[in-house]
Amino acid sequence: MSEYKNFIEDIIDNDIASGKVKTVCTRFPPEPNGYLHIGHAKSLCINFGMKEKYNGTCNLRFDDTNPCKEDKEYVESIKNDITWLGFKWDKLLYASDYFDVMFDCAVKLINKGLAYVSDETAEEIRVRRGTLTEAGVNSPYRNRTVEENLKLFYEMRDGKYGDGEKVLRAKIDMASPNVNMRDPVIYRVLHATHHNTGDKWCIYPMYDFAHPIEDAYEGITHSICTLEFEDHRPLYDWVVKNCDFPAPLPQQIEFARLNITNTIMSKRYLKKLVDEGKVMGWDDPRMPTLSGLRRRGYPAAALRDFCERIGVAKANSEVEEGYLQACVREELNRTANRVMAVFDPLKVTLTNYDGSEELSVEDNPNAENVTYRSVPFSKTLYIDRSDFALVPPPKYYRLKPDGYVRLKGAYIIHCDEAVLGDDGEVKELRCSVVLNSKSGSDESGIKVKGVIQWVDAETCIDVTVRKLQSLLTDVVDGITDFNERYNYDSMKVVNCKAEKSLQSAKVEDKFQFMRVGYYVLDKDSCGNKLVFNEIVGLKDSFNANK
C-alpha cells in the first residue's frame, strides 16, 4: 500500500483511535454469476490491501443468493483469479452458509411488526413504490397481523406457493425520500436448485437483506463497496440494527468504481459476448476479465501497481486505457526476456560467410542478474522487410543499398546488392559481413547507428501471432451502446519467423519480441505449433508517471 492515505484509511484510523475497532476485518463478496474483470481488481486491492496494512483479516465470501445465475465454474474461476493476483483470504464462505440465520432474522422482523408477506406482483410493487418526487402507496397487505405473516412466510418456505406468488417485504416507510427504504422486498419464492444447498430452499433472500446480515455475523468491521450502493446504506444499517446484532456493527463505506476507456466493465455484456460466440470464452485474451488479462500476458504485479497508482476516490471518473498498458509495459520491460522475431521476412545471403556459429545474446539487459542464450548464426538470415529501403528517406539508419547496419548480438553487415523480382519487389539481399565487428569484440572501427533484429534461416521456427485490439471501438457521434461499438477487427492472426529458443517456452511465458512488442505463449500452442498473444506494443506516448 502507498504511504499516501486515502479516505477509507482515514476512517479506519479514526475507528482504531477511538477504540471502536480493534482488528480490521474486511471481505470480498463476488456473486458467482460470471468471471471477475479488471474492475474487481480494484476492489480486491482495496479490501485485501486493508488487511495487509492493518494486519487484519479479509474473507472471500460468495454472494450466492440467486441460484438461477450462479455456477460452480464461476466459483472456481474467482478463487483462481484471486490467488493469481497474489491475495490470500482468511475464510472461504458463502452467503448460502447463512440461509438459516437469514430466515431466523426475517422471522424476528415479522415478530417485531417490521416485515409482512405481500401478494403483489413485481409490477404492482413497482407502480406503488412512487417516484423520486412522489411518495409511494402502502401495500394493501401491509397491515396483516404478525400471526398471519408468520403463517404465510412458513408456507412460502415449505413450497406452498409458486415463483412470484408471494414476497416478504420490510415495513419501513413508503414516504421515504430514499426509494430503497420504501418497503423493499427481502425474500422471494424461487423454485431453483442451488449450487451449494441443492433443493433445501425454495425461498431466497434479496441481496440488500442478505449482505448486511453476512457482514454482521462474520464480524466485518468495514464493508467496502462501490458507489452504486451508497443509496442502499440506510437499508444496510436498518437491517443490522433491527436484527439485533451486537456492537460494533459493520460500517459500509463506498468508493468510486473503476472505469477504463474502451473497456467493457459489465459482467452482463461480457457474458453476452461469450454466449453469442463473439469471443473464445471468458478467458479470451481480448476480454477484460482477470483470466483474459492473464491469458493476454498482463502480469499480476502490473495490475496491482495500476490499482495502486489510480488511487481510491469518492467520485466516479474514467481512466485512460493507456495508463493500464503503461503499467504493464513497465513491468514487462523489467521482467520479460528478449527474443528476435521477423514478421515480414526478407532473405539475406551473406556472400563472404560460409560457416555457422552460436552467438551469446543477453536475455534481458534490465534484469538484476543478466543471463545469456545461444543464438545460431549462419550464411542465410531473415530480416524484417521494414528494415530495408531501396530508396531511403533522409536520416535513415537501417539497411540500404551500399549501407551498413548492425545485426543485434552479431555482426555489422554491408548491403552489396538488392535482388529484384519481375514485379520490381526486393526478393533477396546479398550482403557481406564485417568479420572483425562481432558484438562484444568489435575491432572494425565502423560506426553504425542502426541495430536490427534477425533470425537464422536454417534454424528459425514459424510461429502464429494474435495481434489484439480493444473489443470496443472509440465512441463516435455519441454512440455508447456496446452492441454498436463491437470491434470486429479486434483480433488479427499473422505468422512470423522467430529464433528457435522459443521452442522451450512454456504457456504464460512472456517475451519482448525486440523492436516490436511484448508477447505471451498461449495455451492453444501444441507441440511445434506455437501461438503467441500480443500483450502491449513496445512504445506508447502515454506517460504512467504523470
Image: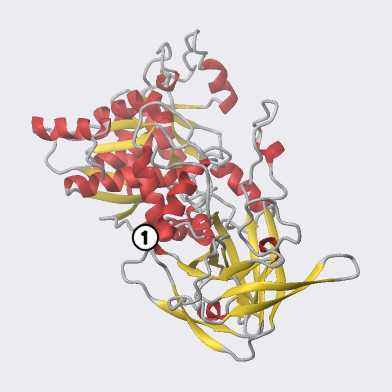
Q: Residue at x 53, y 79 (%)?
A: 501
* Residue at far right of view: 422
Q: Position of residue 73 (x, y in %)?
A: 50, 60
Residue at image location 34% in from the left, 26% down from the top: 233
Q: Residue 332 occupies which quadrant of the picture? A: bottom left
Q: Is residue 252 left or right of residue 271?
A: left
Can I make out residue 105 in this image?
yes
Judge left or right: residue 487 versus residue 219: right
| Residue extending furthest toward the front | 445
Circle 1 residue: 83
**In terms of depth relative to the viewer, which is nearer, 180 or 432?**
432
Rendered image quadrant of residue 448: bottom right
Q: Is residue 235 above or below residue 443?
A: above
Say which of 59 and 291 sits in front: 291
Classify the position of the N terminus by image quarter.
top left
Q: Secondary structure at mark 1?
A: helix
- Front in this rendered view, residue 421 or 125: 421
Q: Residue furthest top?
A: 134
Indicate the quadrant where residue 381 lies: bottom right
Which part of the image, by quadrant, shows the C terminus?
A: top left
Q: Amino acid at mark 1?
A: Thr
In this rendering, does residue 65 appear at all? no
Query: Residue 129 appears at what percent x and percent y?
Result: 50, 17
